[in-house]
Image: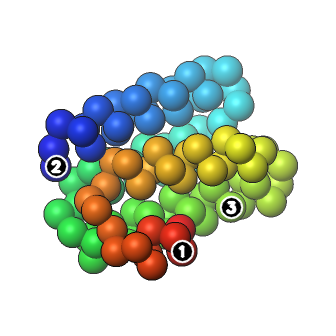
């Protein structure tokens, strides 16, 4: 973890809290995304980041499929998640 990743994590959690307060995000999705962000923050390498990133991706894609999230916010959310984690190999970063 470094200061840049921690700042990205705090910004993301603050935004997710605002979405939850505005009822734009269900409690289960909020909790899952916050847990994934924390997992990414604490990951030391790409291997440790795979599981939380997969969980976040699944949640975001599910919300997108149900029209609970638009493409722009889905893209922002995944980028914000990636910012919380360690540097990933180029191919893995694009797959998410």
**Is the residue marked by circle 3 packed among few (<14), some (14-19), or many (20+) residues within 10 Å?**
some
Q: Residue furthest right?
A: 67
- In the image, is residue 82 above or below residue 16? below
Q: In this view, does 91 lie to the left or right of 38?
A: right
**Is the residue marked by circle 1 packed among few (<14), some (14-19), or many (20+) residues within 10 Å?**
few
- Measuring from the top left, give residue 86's x and y in whole percent: 26, 59
Q: Which colour scheme is used?
A: rainbow
- In the image, is residue 56 above or below residue 7? below
The residue wearing badge 1 is 95
- Measuring from the top left, give residue 55's x and y in whole percent: 50, 64
Q: Which residue is drawn at 54% across and 74% down?
A: 95
The residue wearing badge 3 is 61
Q: Which residue is drawn at 40% across and 63% down?
A: 52
Q: Circle 1 sits in a helix, a strand or a loop, which is it?
A: helix
Q: Which residue is drawn at 22% across and 54% down?
A: 42
- Tell me which label, 1 or 3, sits earlier in the chain: 3
Q: How far apart are marks 2 and 1 (CA)?
A: 23 Å
State which mark lies toward you, 2 or 1.
1
Residue 39 appears anywhere in the view: no
Q: In which quarter of the image is residue 27?
A: top right
- Tell me which label, 2 or 3, sits earlier in the chain: 2
The residue wearing badge 2 is 1
- Measuring from the top left, give residue 69's x and y in whole percent: 74, 44
């Amino acid at each position: 973890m470094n200061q840049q990743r921690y700042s990205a994590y705090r910004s993301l959690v603050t935004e997710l809290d605002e979405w939850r307060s505005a009822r734009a995000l269900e409690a289960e999705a909020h909790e899952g995304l916050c847990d994934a962000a924390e997992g990414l923050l604490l990951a030391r390498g790409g291997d440790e980041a795979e599981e939380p990133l997969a969980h976040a991706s699944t949640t975001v894609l599910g919300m997108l499929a149900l029209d609970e999230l638009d493409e722009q916010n889905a893209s922002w959310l995944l980028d914000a998640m990636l910012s919380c984690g360690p540097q990933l190999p180029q191919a893995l970063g694009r797959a998410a």
